[in-house]
Image: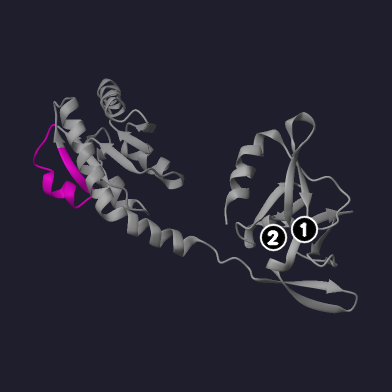
Amino acid sequence: MNVVIIEDEKNLAEELQHYILTARKEWTIVKILPSVKQALAWFESNTCQLVFSDIQLGDGLSFEIFHQLKHHVPVIFCTAFNEYAIQAFKSNGIDYILKPYGQSAINDAITHYESLRQSISPDYNTIIQLLQKPSATSRLLVSLRDKIIPIKTEDIALFYIQHGQVSLIDFEQHKYVISQPLDELETVLGPGFYRADRQHLVNRKAIRDVSQYLGRKLLLNLLVDYNEAITIRKEKATEFLEWLTKD
């Protein structure tokens, strides 16, 4: 969980950070922002899951920040003034804490946030993920002499680069040249293919087994004939083995 604090008094910001991390040790305070100007600049290219914010800052009211945000971010307002409560809840506010506050007030606000998130986020997040997830390509066009042939991606065992040219081998041991770069193929093929290294993109169904190799690497043994050794470096071994167990 990435959290931002907006507070122009350094000692209060540090105290609030302590309260938050005491309540949720696994959370991360990614930024402490002391002004409207700095907050607007930071949020131009960054985001977070939750904001704790004072209202009166040295260069204006923090409401200006949240009115300009491109994405909705829930805010817990922490202020010495109670006259802003209505405006706060119109500015992404989910809770309103009056200064001076202590650990229990922060605990209660976090619990409130989590209960709201649990009640509305799962379905919302699932919808967002589905909308953002690109559809995996089911067919690719390959070249064979003077012909262009559509081939199902499920029939492809391996993509590889040789002499600067991307080619593929299907499960019937046919080889074809393809015009798309390996980086693009990795993006459009979906999770059934794994980028073993810079030269190889492998279909999970093409892997017969895996052997230990030099330097704690993993060596892929394929169901198709291929002369080059395809290895997984030790830093990626755990990730690769987890991928291999998935459907």
As for residue 25 lying within the magenta part, the answer is no
Q: Amino acid at mark 1?
A: Phe
Above or below — where is 195 with respect to 231?
Answer: below
Horizontal arrangement in the rendering, residue 170 relative to residue 47 (left or right): right
Q: Which residues are magenta?
A: 80-96
Viewer-closest of 201 and 81: 201
> Where is mark 2, residue-wise?
185
> Where is mark 1, residue-wise?
159
As for residue 82 lying within the magenta part, the answer is yes
| Position of the C terminus by quadrant | bottom right
The picture places residue 245, in percent across and down from the top left corner, at 59, 49
Q: Residue furthest left?
A: 83
Q: CA distance from mark 1 to mark 2?
A: 9 Å
Sequence-wise, the earlier of marks 1 and 2 is 1
Circles 1 and 2: CB atoms closer than 8 Å: yes
The picture places residue 244, in percent across and down from the top left corner, at 63, 49
Horizontal arrangement in the rendering, residue 206 relative to residue 175 (left or right): left
